[in-house]
Amino acid sequence: MAANLIQLQAGSKTFGMKKIFDAATVAINEGEHVGVIGPNGTGKTTLFKVCSGEETLDEGVLVRSNTLRLGYLVQEITWNPDTTLEEYLSTCLTPPWDIKALGNGLGLSEEMFHMPISSLSGGYQMRCRLLHLIGDEPNLMLLDEPTNYLDLETLLVLETFLQEYRGAFMLISHDREFLRRTTDHIVEIESGEITKYPGTIDDYFEEKALLREQLEKRAMSLEAKRKSILDFAAKFGAKATKAKQAQARLKSLTRLEHIEIKALPVSATIRIPHPTRIGHIAVEVRSLDLGYGDRRVLRGIDIDLLRGDHLAVVGLNGQGKSTFLKGLASMLVPMNGIVKYGYQVKIGYYAQHVSQELDPNRTVLGELQRGAHLDITPQEVRDLAGSLLFSGDAAEKKIRVLSGGEKARVALGKILLSKAPVLVLDEPINHLDFDTVEALTQALKAYPGTIVFVSHDRGFVQRVATKILEVRDGRVQLYPGTYDEYVWSLQKGAFSEAGRSTDDAAAKTDPAPATPREKINYRENRKQLERKQRSHEKKSTVAEQHMSETQKRMDTLNAELAENPPWQRTSEIVEEIGRLEKDLTEAEAQWVQVNEGKEKIDRELQSLIDTQGILAQSSQ
């Protein structure tokens, strides 16, 4: 059994009047890959600060193993403008020649080691911070929103590294796909409680749904019992012969447990008002060049956006994705070419900076109402405010007292209420919690208007986008496939070769040696299948144990029945045996289903291994 690295025991932490943790207990063991989730403001980052020693507990203890070597990747860092990567890494425990080799694996070139870190893009700065963290050789890493503002290529590098990392880590992220691919445990922080679940993020949601179902059944049973007691008291309370019994029954009400049923994750709902009607072509772009001053960032853009298109704009950081969105929304004057809007087209433009344009003296509701279409009712405004985490008194707060993230949510809400037929959204899900990201994803997916957006959340892009536009080297190009295919092509390094003719491709009959990205893809697929394999084995074991225990109980009852007990007990036994037989039948059916699924995964895994072996032989 893996040893504890760090353990919180009955820990409590309060900020002002708000209880962040309340007698919470959780342990992280060697080698565990833990995703940390929960609504915004519940204490995820606070937990990391407590673990790292930046914050202290009000009550309880934090037990650290003598072998613990902890590394903390914070959300933001301020760089000395002149510090080079080589200087930044000079304090690491790992020798310089080894750390450079690790850096190359993260896509950091030899030239970058001699450049000021402040001159690198955000994605490469994150790689520098990650490399420094690895160089300190921790056996437990704390990663606070490491995917924020990462381009897809950097995210894939980070994902592969974490999949293969042998130490333990705790990871805060709202990116469900990233969590699915990198973690094997989930820690949930909610309402002052910290709960740890074994398995993937999908296992967590299944467990939560099952728990809720069980609680609802128990609550219904208790409610029926309460009603029975009250009915009895109402019927017989006035009768002298029954009054004493009625009082006793009423007194028993206080002993009935109270079942609190918390909302399931993904419980929020966002309803975006239908946009005003427009023609078939929403936006025409012709020979468009965009830039700043004399610097041309994008050139020669020709594209038609149709009513109902959901266009995801993808590409490396610094290539011009946000510039393209600004040009499309007429927030940037073209250096050349035109952007022509269709009949009755209005643009709803959202970016992080638009929150600075909010009126600081208005309330949240007042500012949302100011941006809403004339057809939108006050109740619709209030409903959307609640969906964006402004319910009750929070909706009456003045804009001036809100945090940057809260202001960003208000600005997004104004755009969603505008009924604009074309939404241009730059990173719309930053500052949203897990539930709200899911709700917005579903709402935008169903939105009948045109959407052009940038996001670094793969699950969000995969579900919302119907078309993919890549920005690369000053040009834009529609990708002829789905987002999943685009991600696959990035992993294979194939999109840069997309211009080659099919004749050229057909002429190459010999299989090429596996590239590093192909090897990464193989390892990723194998790891996913092995994770599913373990999950099915666990479910099979649980089902077998349940079947065995049920059968033992039935054997015990049958033995008791053979002794000819009193008729009342006989009736109870027969009734329980009937329930157990039904339970056993259902458990056997579940066991068969799980094992059939496991056999299918076994075959897929063996096929993958065999195929990789053939490719390896052909490359020799």
Image: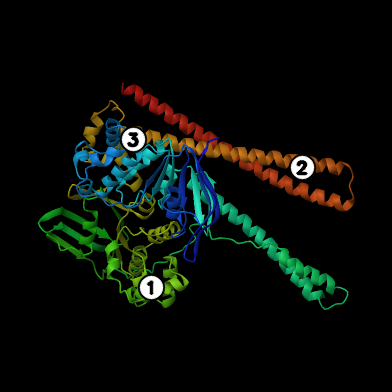
Q: Where is residue 551 in the image (x, y as percent from the top left)?
A: 73, 40
**Residue at x-position 25% and y-position 47%:** 316
Q: Residues within 10 Å of mark 2 (few under 14, many from 20)?
A: many
Q: Label 2, label 1: how many angstroms apart (C-alpha)? A: 61 Å
The residue beneath circle 3 is: 93
Q: Is residue 601 above or below residue 513?
A: below
Closer to viewer: mark 2 or mark 3: 3
The answer to whether residue 214 is left or right of residue 43 is right
Q: Position of residue 417 (x, y in %)?
A: 36, 70
The residue beneath circle 1 is: 364
Q: Position of residue 327 (x, y in %)?
A: 20, 61
The reply to whether discs 1 and 3 touch (Cβ–Cβ < 8 Å) is: no
The amino acid marked with disc number 2 is Met
The reply to whether discs 2 and 3 touch (Cβ–Cβ < 8 Å) is: no
The answer to whether residue 71 is left or right of residue 288 is right
**Res 554 label:** 2
Q: Residues within 10 Å of mark 3 (few under 14, many from 20)?
A: some
Q: What element carries label 3?
A: loop
Q: Is residue 277 above or below residue 489?
A: below
Quadrant in which the C terminus appears: top left
Q: Where is residue 603 in the image (x, y as percent from the top left)?
A: 49, 31
Return the residue nearer the eye: 6 or 278: 6
Q: Is residue 450 above or below residue 122?
A: below
